[in-house]
Amino acid sequence: MDAHNFERLDNPLFFTRERTDPSAGLPEPGQDGLRPTGAALTPPLSPSELERGERLLYRLAEFGHLLWESGIEVGPQQLLDLAETLNEIDITNPGDFYYTLKCSLLTRHEQETLFDQLFNYYWLTRDRQDRPPDPGPTRRDDRQIRLPPSERKRLAEHLNADNQQRELRMGERESERRRLLDEQAGEPEDEQAPPQGTAYSALELLRKKDFESFTWEEVQEAKRLMAEMRWNLGLRPTRRKRPVRKGDYPDMRRIVRRNLKYGAELLELTWRENKEKPRPLVIICDISGSMSLYSRLLLHFIHTVSNGLLNVEAFVFGTRLTRITRQLKRRDVDDAVREVSRTVQDWSGGTRIGEALHTFNQQWARRVLGRGAVVLIISDGWDRGDASLLRAEMDRLQHSCHRLIWLNPLLGSPDYRPLTIGMKTALPYIDDFLPAHNLDSLIHLGKLLERIDDRRPTRTPATRREAVKAWNRPTP
Amino acid sequence: MFARRYVADRSLATAVFLALKRRKPLLLEGEPGVGKTEVAKVLADLLETRLIRLQCYEGIDISTAVYEWNYTRQMLYIRLMEASGATRQEELKEIFGPDFLIKRPLLQAIDPANAKAPVLLIDELDRSDEEFEAYLLELLSDFQITIPEIGTIAAKEPPIVVITSNRTREIHDALRRRCLYYWIDYPTLEKEYSIVLARMPEAPEWLAKQVCAFVRELRALDLFKAPGVAETLDWIASLLALNQLELVEGTVRDTLGALLKYQDDVLKVGGSNLGKLLEKARNVSS
């Protein structure tokens, strides 16, 4: 950056500590659910107000840091760029200042509300500590952040502790519920039959053991094993070409160059063919109370999968759907899982599969299901929501993905039958219904994923009826 | 921008202004049909410069986006040279020269021969694959392209770049950070009304008001694909074609296809509550 830019930036800025009337002052972004429009802006401030300002460059850096801490990842280059950009506008016009910061620093629509709140907090309300806090926004999304980061951290920790306690309670309640279910299905109490034969190594035992009955040490061991698993997804041809010795399309650019030495005769031919790429994988995992015995380990599983494969999108749901793809990008499993549980608000609560899938279909399907994606739903099918909604959403989901796989931890028991309303409703729309209760079942899943080819499974009403029948038939 | 029949509010105007001043690419995201592509068109019109459009698709590569050699001409030329008995050296030099180069949109955009910086519209970048996006990253940072046989071609005047995305895939952070970002939302009732008036001056005001109000009601419903501004304009055009001066339930039902593109949505809206929706729309617009 040139020296003259600094000169300009060293000017004191108008964002002052005090303001007599907030309603007549700067736009309060997001307060009425609207972005401020030109009409709401006030004329530039007077010189006396300017004097009370702080140095702009410092404040910009500080604001950038605040954004970074809150998850809007602002790079130093962006800040430098912004500092230069501010030369182009009249920074004493609050609206323009806000718009400029926004289009320079914000890069995703999802973070818009958060950005507005942070802007509001940093540039407008932070310096007015003596003022009573805002009466509170009316919109639901605005609730997330009005607190300084330190406060938020404390709050998050507090909420987390609360969640953990609730989870413990839910765990107890769950075993109770499971017993009821078992009785309903006419199952014997003891479903953990010891493996047949005698020559099992400890490792093999671990692979067959239900996650539900894992001890702490076994969990650690399982995590280690999962980290060692390698995941490959079926390939699909893309429209991008690559040169090969013998292929489907002539590679004209190379042919002309190679054959120059022969004059105008084309003697050597080279070819191109379609490049192949792994399919995208979308995981939608149930973390409601009934899944709590499995969900932490399954999160580890999702983490290894998403770090081992190129293109994985992950979501969790209880009563609402949360995208956790970004949180899982952290390399360390425990960090990632901690980050997820910090983000997810409905850990170990109720289940609303229908609503969650509705949100997914509305907001995410178009964005993550392109290019022949494979969808993995992990849930036990305990649903308190609306069955007709679930049916419609499953239908839509199956139509928009290449393969729909449902993993159910309860399926580990040989006598399991899909009797819950949720599972019954969803079953006709599932291409593969698989267990996910132990390491073996995950290994099995890995093998299935590798085998997925270009053929879509047949999905006619008849095949659907057939699949449901097959699952309801009593075991011989 | 109003003069060019585009209704932009101050926030978008600021983003466009900065994109022009700082010569940074402008990344526009938003639901389909809210006027992202239109921004580039209007911009080119406004600056009285050329609009170069690159429509992205899966598998788009250098030969379709940047440049390609004209093979047929190259081979014919070699034959011609052979017939006239010229030496090899000359041939080689010439057939990989500018005469045989087919310039695709990106090369056109940075052509040093451009007298005025053109507007380069990279449309629906989310449809291309990651490899192409990575290539673009390099191009957009220094506005130059290297062709092995010719050398480096650099723009004298960097083009004004507008990138649009429908978010069918996430655009990479690295690209996002190099751009000014703007999310185009569905317009407010007033804004949509002025868009309709600007675009369709022949539409009666009363009808325009009703249409905007009705479309707004639709967007509030939980539809799979809410109608965009493009659909609103389409719908008005169809209503005008049918000589409608007011929204009548029967006609609305028959023309819903101009607004809604999914059968589920048509069923949801066309059901028993259509009358109520129309009533509401009439009340808002009166």
Image (spheres, coloured by chain):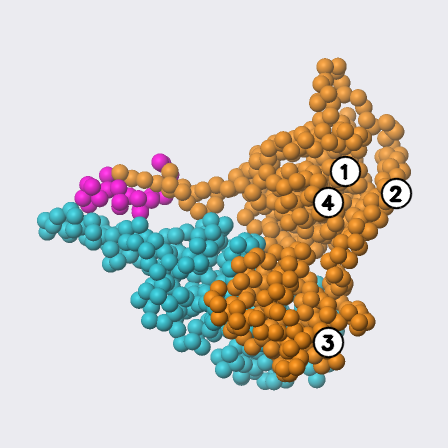
Chain colours: A orange, B cyan
Mark 4 crowdedness (10 Å alpha carbons): few <14, some 14-19, many ≥20:
few
Quadrant into which the C terminus of chain B falls = bottom right
* Viewer-closest of B276 and A439: A439
Q: Quadrant of residue A215?
A: top right
The part of the chain drawn in magenta is A245-267
Q: Secondary structure at mark 1?
A: helix
Q: Are marks 1 and 3 on the same chain?
A: yes
Residue A18: numbered disc: 3
Q: Chain of mark 2?
A: A
SS at badge 2: helix
- Rounded to the nearest whole Å, what is the CA distance between mark 2 and mark 3? 49 Å
The subunit carrying tag 1 is: A
Q: Which residue in the protein does label 1 denote?
A: A294
State which tag comes first along the sequence, 4 or 3. Answer: 3
Q: CA distance from mark 2 to mark 1?
A: 15 Å
Q: Is residue A17 left or right of residue A260?
A: right
Frontmost of labels 4 and 2 is 4
